[in-house]
């Protein structure tokens, strides 16, 4: 049986079901993860140094452990390990391709969850004139 695409349970438990907190975490995730994946892709596709690939995978791994998109965290762990061992760029590329494909599928769901948790706008406060 295939794991669900996204598991928000950990995030909601971490936030004690505070939707404002969930919104903030998802916003931060969306502010960093797409660019971080693009950077990892650029590093892998240009066959950059293994050490740089390993550091980028490590950086992304922490975000992937909070907003749990199917197999992204595990694939990042594997990329980090392979890069640390300086081996198997083909396997790293395959793992990266899977991350990109899964993230593209998950992105609209993550955005929808963020919008669901969006805090109500604060009403404008009227200025009171004191005489």
Image: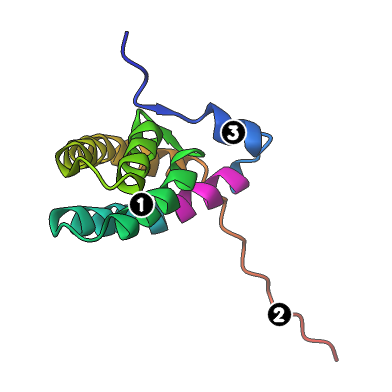
Give the magenta range. Answer: 21-29
Nearer mark to the viewer, of 1 and 3: 1
Q: Is residue 131 left or right of residue 104?
A: right
Residue at the right extreme, as displayed = 131
Q: Is the residue marked by circle 2 packed among few (<14), some (14-19), or many (20+) residues within 10 Å?
A: few
> Residue 10: x and y, percent?
56, 30
Q: Is the residue marked by circle 3 packed among few (<14), some (14-19), or many (20+) residues within 10 Å?
A: some
Q: What number is the disc on residue 127? A: 2
Task: Name the main secondary structure of what is drawn in magenta.
Answer: helix
> Residue 100: x and y, percent?
22, 42
- Find disc 3 in the rendering and name its residue: 12
Residue at 24% x, 43% y is 87
State the CA–CA distance, disc 1 to disc 2: 54 Å
Residue at 33% x, 35% y is 75
Question: Quick one: label 1 or label 2, which is nearer the N terminus?
Answer: 1
Question: Quick one: label 1 or label 3, which is nearer the N terminus?
Answer: 3
- Find disc 1 in the rendering and name its residue: 54
Question: Quick one: label 2 or label 3, which is nearer the N terminus?
Answer: 3
Residue at the bottom extreme, as displayed = 131
Q: Are marks 2 and 3 in contact (CB under 8 Å)?
A: no
């Amino acid at each position: 049986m295939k794991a669900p695409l996204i598991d928000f349970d950990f995030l909601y438990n971490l936030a004690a079901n505070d939707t404002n907190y969930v919104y903030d975490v998802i916003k931060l995730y969306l502010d960093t993860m797409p660019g971080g994946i693009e950077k990892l892709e650029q590093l892998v596709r240009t066959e950059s140094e293994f050490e740089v690939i390993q550091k980028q995978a490590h950086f992304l791994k922490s975000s992937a452990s909070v907003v749990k998109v199917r197999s992204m965290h595990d694939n990042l762990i594997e990329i980090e390990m392979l890069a640390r061992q300086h081996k198997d760029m083909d396997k790293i590329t395959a793992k990266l391709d899977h991350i990109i494909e899964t993230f593209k599928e998950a992105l609209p769901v993550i955005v929808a969850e963020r919008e669901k948790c969006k805090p109500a706008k604060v009403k404008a406060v009227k200025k009171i004139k004191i005489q």
